[in-house]
Amino acid sequence: MDKIQLESFLKTIASGVEIKEGKQYLEVTVPSSSLHQLAKSLKEKEESKFDFLFCLTGVDYGTELGVIYHLRSTSYDHTVVLKTRTADRENPILDSVCDIWETAEFHEREVFDLLGIKFKNHPDLRRLFLDNSWGFPLRKDYVDDINIVTK
């Protein structure tokens, strides 16, 4: 599937998403409430078969926190990027996708550890690198005078 065909396919299975052509991949911005269902459809649908989550990245946009998912179909050799955000910086929660792609388990733990985004239905959400005395060092508002990390 090329980018045009993939965009047409996405429009048939997803509503309320923003689709744009990025520099390298098709980018789909999805409301956090629709993320899990869209991700599951992209993996299970015969037309897409996105069976490989090759990157999951947490992002601090300033006013919002988000996650970016790079998905690849090893059967069809196409790629798509899913993006989602939450405006709740005090208690950021997104749905886990580790029931869809097992590799997300450690990626989500890393995002939780460094940005504080919690993932609903994650089987083992705990810090991966840092202990609980740390805050979330990849947030733009993070300040740590002891270890000399500042804004």
Image: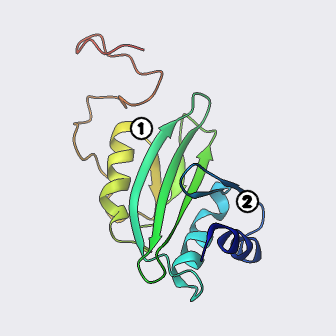
Residue 27: which disc? none
Residue visible at 42% across and 14% down? 151
Residue in front for this viewpoint, 62 or 93: 62
Q: Is residue 56 above or below residue 76?
A: above
Q: Which residue is mark 2?
A: 17
Secondary structure found at label 2: loop
Type of the residue with mark 1: Leu
Q: Is residue 96 visible?
A: no
Q: Is residue 137 above or below residue 66?
A: above
Q: Nearer the viewer, mark 1 or mark 2?
A: 2
Contact? badges 1 and 2 (CB < 8 Å)? no
Q: Is residue 84 above or below residue 138?
A: below
Residue in front for this viewpoint, 69 or 3: 3
Coordinates of residue 76 in the picture (x, y in percent): 49, 81
Q: Is residue 134 visible?
A: yes
Q: Is residue 61 above or below residue 95?
A: above
Neighbours of disc 2 within 10 Å: few (<14), some (14-19), many (20+):
some
Q: Which residue is mark 1?
A: 115
Secondary structure found at label 1: helix
Relative to residue 130, is residue 38 drawn left or right?
A: right
Neighbours of disc 1 within 10 Å: few (<14), some (14-19), many (20+):
many
Type of the residue with mark 2: Val
Q: What is the tally of numbered marks visible in this picture?
A: 2
